[in-house]
Image: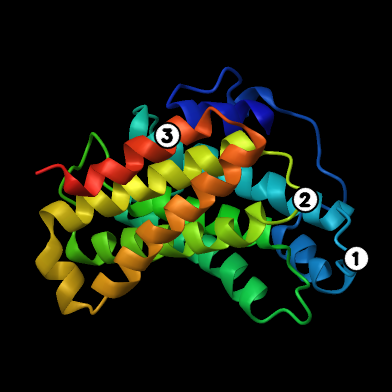
């Protein structure tokens, strides 16, 4: 998981391929069971086995998206087309998000919801193979980036946060996605009435960076850089 997190954060290829990972996850290996069991196990913020497995599964999902979209990995043989693969990935992400939204008393931790939104953003945002995604993908990339930023704003305020680099880096990437989409496809964003949410999310990015800089002072330099980005013609 650490290998995948670092690779996605730094834009590099994973050092260990999925084919070389043969260790079985705890439980029966059924994704749905772990997701469902996570409903009742999260009561005091401690990491349960179910949450750990669910996060691993999201990390595997992100890894597949990342390698196919950014490193030319072939889609799995069971899918008839790229669009079929995207639909399957979207359904897997959506099932996780639906579970977290319908959970009771915060049964699904925010950081798992954040991982799901990041997966969705990786799936739909512009990438070297397609710098001009469909309007539908641009909207999903926008809404997932906004949700990710807002989710990280909740996460970074807790004193228990350990992955400051990952939070700040993923927030920065989400901000760049929003700036790119708004700078090139503003009409699509305005037609979907997302402009205010997008601009508000960019303000939230600054709040995240300012909070992060209190723990890691070097982040202050990133905050100054991001603050100037919207003013660049």
Report if the CB atoms under discs 2 and 3 are less than 8 Å apart. no
Q: Residue at x 62, y 50 (%)?
A: 58
Residue shown at the point (61%, 20%) measured from the top left = 16
Specify whether residue 224 is in view.
Answer: yes
Quadrant assignment for the N terminus: top right
Label of residue 159 in the image? 2
- Secondary structure beneath label 1: loop
Give the residue at mark 1. 44
Q: Which mark is residue 222?
A: 3
Residue located 36% across and 57% down the image:
202
Residue 195 vs 220, above or below: the answer is below
> Which type of secondary structure does the marked residue at label 3 adopt?
helix
Q: Residue 36, image x and y in percent?
A: 77, 70
Whether tag 1 and tag 3 are in contact, CB under 8 A, the answer is: no
Question: Label 2 to label 3, Cα distance in Å?
Answer: 21 Å
Image quadrant where one finds the C terminus: top left
- In this picture, is 156 found above or below 100? above
Quadrant of the rendered image containing residue 229 = top left
């Amino acid at each position: 998981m650490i290998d995948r997190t670092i690779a996605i954060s730094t834009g590099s290829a994973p050092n260990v391929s999925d084919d070389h990972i043969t260790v079985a996850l705890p439980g029966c290996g059924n994704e749905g069971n772990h997701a469902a069991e996570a409903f009742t196990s999260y009561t005091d913020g401690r990491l349960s086995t179910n949450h750990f497995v669910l996060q691993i599964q999201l990390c595997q999902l992100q890894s597949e998206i990342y390698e196919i979209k950014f490193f030319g990995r072939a889609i799995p043989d069971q899918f008839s087309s790229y669009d079929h693969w995207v639909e399957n990935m979207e359904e897997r992400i959506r099932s996780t998000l639906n579970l977290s939204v319908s959970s009771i008393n915060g049964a699904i931790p925010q950081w798992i919801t954040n991982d799901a939104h990041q997966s969705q953003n990786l799936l739909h945002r512009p990438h070297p193979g397609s710098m001009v995604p469909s309007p539908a993908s641009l909207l999903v990339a926008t809404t997932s980036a906004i949700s990710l930023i807002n989710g990280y704003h909740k996460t970074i305020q807790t004193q228990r946060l350990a992955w400051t680099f990952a939070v700040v880096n993923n927030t920065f990437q989400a901000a760049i996605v929003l700036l790119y989409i708004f700078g090139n496809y503003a009409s699509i964003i305005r037609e979907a009435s997302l402009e205010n949410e997008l601009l508000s999310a960019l303000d939230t990015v600054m709040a995240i960076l300012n909070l992060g800089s209190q723990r890691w002072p070097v982040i202050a330099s990133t905050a100054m850089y991001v603050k100037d980005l919207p003013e660049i013609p």
